[in-house]
Image (cartoon, helix red, strand yellow):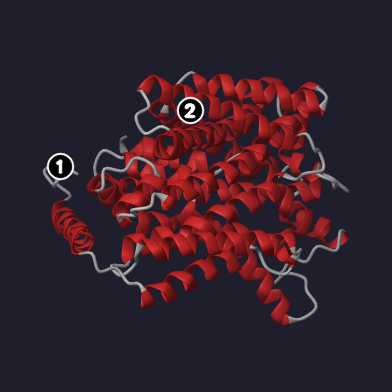
Amino acid sequence: MGSWVTAFSAQASDMSGWLLMGLPGAIYLAGTGKVWIAIGLFIGTVLNWMLVSARLRVYTQKTNAITLPCFFEARFRDPTGLLRIVSAIIILIFFAIYASSGLVATGKLFESTFGVKYHTAVIIGGLIIVAYTFLGGFMAVCWTDLLQGALMVFAIVIVPVLTYHHVGGIEAISEAMSLKNISPALLPQAGTLPVAVCMIVSSMAWGLGYFGQPHILVRFMSIKSVNKLGQSMAIAIVWVLLSLGGAVFVGFIGIAMYENLSGGQEEKVFIYMIRDLFNPWFGGILLAAIFSAIMSTIDSQLLVSSSALSEDFYCKAIKKQASQREIVLVGRICVIIISVIALFMALDRDNTILGIVSYAWGGFGAAFGPLVLFALFSRKTSWQSALAGMVTGTVVLVLWKQAGLSDTMYEIVPGFAANCLTILLINLLIGQKDKDILKEFDDVVNILCHCEKADRPTRQSSSPSL
């Protein structure tokens, strides 16, 4: 993939329906205190591109890996295959949860736009998305993400720009926030300063999730050359800055426009603004951006899930000599299974888009985030450390969530910390000693240094292409 396709595909598959519905809804309810989520996501995006993209691109080519589970197994030379199998299972579980958030967004979109009953809308959306995913593979998904990402950023920027003066500007927004007892301060409303700081850390911790999202990381692997990542990073940072900024302002403008939206209705504030203020023809294009956001993420998730089941689980644990046709069939069956599970989860209309996304996002961040960072930056990490860390991070996240502690701290924080601590402790006991693995790590570092030196003076097209 080229720079533009890589950047737009990575960000469009990242920002699903929660960007245009979930985040504005959270801002509408809580005001400035929820801005920390957007700040954390922006910082996480930047760090992911700066720290992970180039190293992952070089390392996955060096290990001949095309999926994240495959990379983990090849990077650490896991003789048991457990790293690949367990990570594939984690992907299937959390992507089923993640995909359900897209179907919830689809249900709310179709319900508001066409007057279709919510449950019917979810089923229709699920059928459309499965059929759409079957039509093309990874390349097709990435190229459509380019167009969908362009439509998303256009809609999320143009709507608040055109509606800002309609509501009366900052004065009207401030007055509405005052009437609804929403604090304008960046510090969340809380009893004590430690609690407020804890809430800020919890919100900003969304940024940690970026290091472990398979559907985003696979975009880094797919770029034509590591030398193109600099341009891709610049494009992606501008895209995410405009998108997150637009979503935040939609939430604030919605406070001034609508009273007493709750019970999931707050996540329709973007839809209501388009419906009430724009010509139906132009409004239809803007509403299509919401479905673009949903589809650009779900198709990526379904494809990664398909690869996880067929390549990383079926071929590894069930039938190692499976034919290509059989692998494709298993992958398509996986798409249907994940979609059906997600559909049943989405039928509960009490679910909020942001609530579902936060659990799945945290799951990937806690399970894979530290593992990706240690794989790319630590020579000492062994496959035993990697496996133990991944399992520990996932278990801690699930237990934290089930214990109802998510209101005090986002579950990604204890899960991420437990994963890192486990890897560090086991590295002290069972560090990496395989000379081939250590040499491979050094080779990757040398390649990156060579590329940086060649790219720094003139950014000539003759720089080494990987």
Q: CA distance from mark 1 to mark 2?
A: 38 Å
Q: Secondary structure at mark 2?
A: helix
Vertical comparison of 240 with 202: above or below = above
**Local crowd at mark 1 within 10 Å, few (<14), some, or many (≥20)?**
few
- Sequence-earlier tag: 1 or 2: 2
Please identify the quadrant where the N terminus is shown.
top left
Residue at the extreme bottom? 193
17 and 282: which is toward the camera:
17
Q: As drawn, is 1 to the left or to the right of 386?
A: left
Q: As drawn, is 274 to the left or to the right of 360?
A: right
Q: As drawn, is 48 to the left or to the right of 457?
A: right
Residue 235 seen anywhere in this rendered image of the structure: no
The disc placed on residue 331 is 2
318 and 351: which is toward the camera:
318
Which residue is pictured at 73% across the width and 67% down the height? 405
Q: Secondary structure at mark 1?
A: loop
**Local crowd at mark 2 within 10 Å, few (<14), some, or many (≥20)?**
many
Q: Position of residue 430 (x, y in %)?
A: 35, 72
Using the rendered view, name the quadrant where residue 322 is placed: top left
Q: Position of residue 131 (x, y in %)?
A: 57, 19
Amino acid tagged 1: Ser
Which residue is pictured at 54% across the width and 53% down the height? 364
User: Label 1, on which residue?
Assistant: 461
